């Protein structure tokens, strides 16, 4: 019977990143045996009413699960953004619970009490309950600067985690005085510097077509360039191995003074890092595709030879 109970404990803990709640341990082992396991350090307390099975690795995912089990919460804000690949990993442990819940967690975990946290909001990602990507981006506006939210939105669109229209719908549904997250997102979406619309999907179609028809290498679309851990630029298409960046300028998003300055600053930063930047207009792509291909082929030949 003891062996059977140990197997049951192992199986239960394995499904929860090596963790058991106090209630689960009592059910699997019985109260007296559970207390003995704690005294023998076979169960190690990591959060109120949550224990780690001795020998299981102490990981970031385990920390998130422990906090989630302790408060019956949903992984959210920066932690959710990391799980969705929207921000650079930093090991935050943040969760959301309904506003009426008032349970404590141990640092470094942080719990946000949210009035509009509806049942069924969580999805599961990497074995954890987490806010969906759209809600995550809006919550992110409560805890990080606007420029980082803007970057997260751009990355989410690039990764197809969501579309702008989905962000707008939820922003409008959640928007209310005092909720800064929706205000930050509204400011970004209403600005003229964030350069994404239906052009991205159309750009993908055009360059995929060019690549296949003319045997060009496969482009990395909406490619992010980083240097020394810092974000430099996001380019329309790239061949990273030879540092060739391709930008396609649509008048609608490049006609303001702010956008013009933004484009030039990005290009200067890329050139300083050794990138070659080719710029085409939509007229070039639509009406002179063969010339676009020839220019790209010459650049590839030159950079490959170098």
Image (cartoon, grey):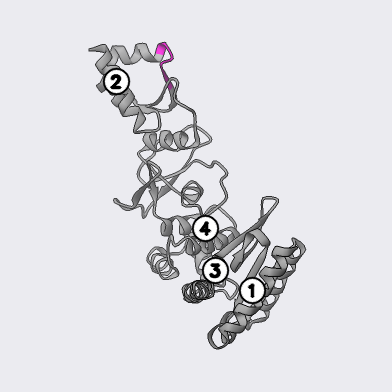
Q: Are marks 3 and 2 in contact (CB under 8 Å)?
A: no
In primary-sequence order, the first of circles 3 and 2 is 2
Secondary element under disc 2, as helix, strand or loop, is helix
Distance between the alpha carbons at the discs numbered 1 and 2: 61 Å
Secondary element under disc 3, as helix, strand or loop, is helix
Q: Nearer the viewer, residue 134 or 15?
A: 15
Q: How crowded is mark 1: few (under 14 residues within 10 Å), some or many (20 or more)?
A: some
**Residue 61 drawn at (x, y percent):** 46, 37
303 drawn magenta: no
Return the residue at label 4.
141
In primary-sequence order, the first of circles 1 and 2 is 2
Return the residue at label 1.
297
What residue lies at 40% left-to-right and 32% top-to-bottom?
A: 17
The residue mark sitting in front, 1 or 4, is: 1
Point out the stretch of residues depicted in magenta: 39-44
Secondary element under disc 4, as helix, strand or loop, is loop
């Amino acid at each position: 019977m003891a062996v059977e109970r140990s197997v049951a404990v192992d199986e239960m803990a394995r499904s929860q990143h090596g963790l058991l709640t106090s209630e689960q341990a009592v059910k699997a082992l019985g109260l007296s045996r559970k207390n003995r396991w704690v005294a023998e350090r076979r169960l190690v307390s990591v959060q109120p009413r949550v224990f780690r099975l001795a020998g299981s690795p102490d990981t970031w995912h385990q920390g998130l699960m422990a906090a989630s089990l302790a408060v019956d919460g949903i992984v959210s804000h920066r932690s959710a953004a990391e799980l969705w690949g929207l921000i650079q990993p930093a090991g935050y442990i943040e969760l959301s619970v309904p506003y009426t819940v008032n349970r404590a967690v141990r640092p470094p975990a942080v719990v946000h009490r949210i009035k509009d946290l509806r049942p069924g909001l969580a999805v599961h990602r990497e074995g954890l309950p987490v806010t969906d990507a759209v809600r995550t981006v809006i919550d992110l506006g409560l805890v990080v600067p606007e420029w980082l939210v803007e970057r997260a939105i751009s990355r989410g669109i690039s990764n197809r985690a969501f579309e702008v229209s989905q962000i707008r719908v939820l922003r409008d549904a959640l928007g209310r005085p005092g909720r800064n997250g929706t205000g930050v997102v509204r400011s970004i979406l209403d600005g003229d510097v964030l350069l994404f619309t239906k052009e991205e999907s159309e750009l993908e179609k055009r360059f995929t077509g060019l690549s296949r028809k003319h045997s060009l290498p496969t482009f990395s679309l909406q490619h992010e360039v980083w240097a020394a851990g810092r974000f430099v630029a996001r380019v329309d298409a790239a061949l990273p191995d030879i540092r060739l960046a391709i930008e396609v300028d649509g008048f609608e998003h490049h006609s303001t003074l702010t956008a013009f300055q933004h484009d030039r600053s990005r290009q200067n930063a890329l050139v300083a890092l050794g990138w070659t930047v080719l710029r085409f207009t939509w007229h070039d792509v639509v009406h002179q595709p063969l010339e676009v291909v020839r220019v790209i082929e010459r650049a590839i030949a030159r950079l490959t030879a170098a």
